[in-house]
Amino acid sequence: MHEQIQTLGRQLTLLGVLVLLSACNSKTRIDEYRQNPTAIMNSEDSVVILGRRHSSGHETEIDFVSCVGDSLASGESGLQVIPEKQFVDAMYPYFETSTAPMDVKNLDRLVQNPAIAEKFADFRLRYFIWIDGSTETTDKKGSISCAVGPGGGGCFGFATWDDEANYEASIWDFENLKLSGKISAETTGTSYLPAIIVPIPMLARVQSGACKSMAAQIKSFLN
Amino acid sequence: MKKPSKLYFEKSKLILSLAFLLSLSACNQSLTMEAKTDVPTPLAVKLPLSIGVHYDENFRNYTYEENSEDRQNWAIKSGTSQVDLFERVLPSMFQDISHIEDISGTLITDVDGVIVPEVEEMQFALPNETKSDLYEVWIKYKVKLLDKNGDLVADWPVTGYGKSSTEFLKSRDKGLQAAINSAFRDAGARFALTFSKIPAVCQSGATGIC
């Protein structure tokens, strides 16, 4: 009888852990729109991934842009990716938030400037990838209280929150000065924070999920 | 019932004092910081002009000060950074740059014109004030162009806007610092890109660039 209770206890604990682990999973939806065909890139050709930050309500996170860049550069079919800061600093003042081209046609005007054309040639740029979006917490529930006393301290309670990541990548073909297409990624997930003396965070990796999915889709779009 | 020991009371007093000090520091709104700038050298084709630049005392030592209910004893020094910004941008725009210490009533030879930047206004917005996730900074300069005689040829506003998102464990100082740097970059970019398009500058005999 005692053994049966122990086995049941173990099974319930395992079930609880599995429920909690599956609960903080995130879901991603990817949409792709292709306007023009893409050419296979030479091994020396490179892409630059830039974040749009002109909107007053949000700004595309630097770490999201670098995450997509790192994912694109990794693996056997990895692309040559120019880091955002290196590119924006080298092209200053033409790719600042308020001065960056908003349309692929504006690149034509930029390359009329010999200094800019020379820099583009140095980078061996083939595609510009502009990412616009952000990750936001859309809902919060529950509460956690912490207390400290002479005998020690601890936290008790339960909190949960929903995160939503929405990003859109516009791919510009620099050689043909045309929009190649757009890829959007929408990821949602719920995180949990139960606290029994010590808070145990179970975080839904929403931004990371959107980054990996978007990078994989861009890679397949360009290859 | 066991009487609490003296050590127990000492420990409790220490914890209460620490909690009190922590709560006091959490309410402290004062801010003293020195703005830093990290503006790259602009990519530009130099105009064939010899330009003088004059930074007055107010510009060199510019400090934003505010003492209100929400912003007690705010002092953000940015004079050095503003000079650094123009020192980085101007040499990439003009063939030759020289520093003019005194512009009062003397004939300035060897230059086509003298640029005098002034800070007109600086504004800050914190996330709790705008109910957003952003630190925001606006800066407005008045840039004057003088001729060789020290007479005003043109003046025009140059604005810069910068923002920085709140991140986990990012302090107010770091958030403001990033937004200030972003505003400096923006102002430098706008100045470099619009200088030759300002009608009065373009048409003036001092520059003759049109």
Image (cartoon, rainbow, N blue to C red):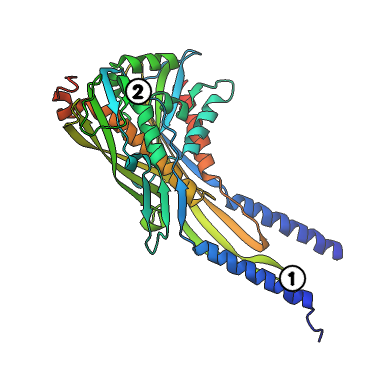
| Mark 2 crowd level (few <14, some 14–19, many ≥20, 10 Å Cα) | some
Q: Judge by depth and name the residue closer to the eye, A60 or B168.
A: B168
Q: Nearer the viewer, residue B136 or B83?
A: B83
Q: CA distance from mark 2 to mark 1?
A: 65 Å
Query: In this rendering, do the residues under marks 2 and 1 share a single chain?
Result: no
Left or right, residue A206 beside residue B19: left
Picture coordinates of residue A23, whole percent (x, y):
58, 53
For label 2, the SS is helix
Does residue A57 appear left or right of residue B34 in this picture? left
The label shown at residue A151 is: 1
Q: Are marks 2 and 1 in contact (CB under 8 Å)?
A: no
Q: The disc numbered 1 marks a residue on which chain?
A: A
Task: List x then y, in percent, for residue B128.
Answer: 41, 57
The disc at residue B158 is: none
**Where is residue A40 shown, x and y percent of the image?**
45, 15
- Label 1 residue SS: loop
Residue shown at the point (37%, 42%) measured from the top left: B162
Q: Position of residue A126 (x, y in %)?
A: 41, 18
Q: Residue at x 41, y 55 (%)?
A: B74
Chain letter for the residue marked with disc 2 in the picture: B
Q: Can the viewer see residue B207 in this picture?
A: yes
From the viewer's perspective, is residue B82 above or below residue B113? below
Q: Quadrant of residue A166?
A: top left
Residue at point 47% right, 12% down? A42
Tell me if residue A135 can be seen.
Answer: no
Is the residue A35 above or below the residue B59 in the image? above
Please, is residue B83 above or below residue A73 in the view?
A: below
Q: Residues within 10 Å of mark 1 (few under 14, many from 20)?
A: few
For badge 1, the amino acid type reads Gly
Q: Which residue is mark 2?
A: B91
Q: Amino acid at mark 2?
A: Pro
Nearer the observer, B14 or A52: B14
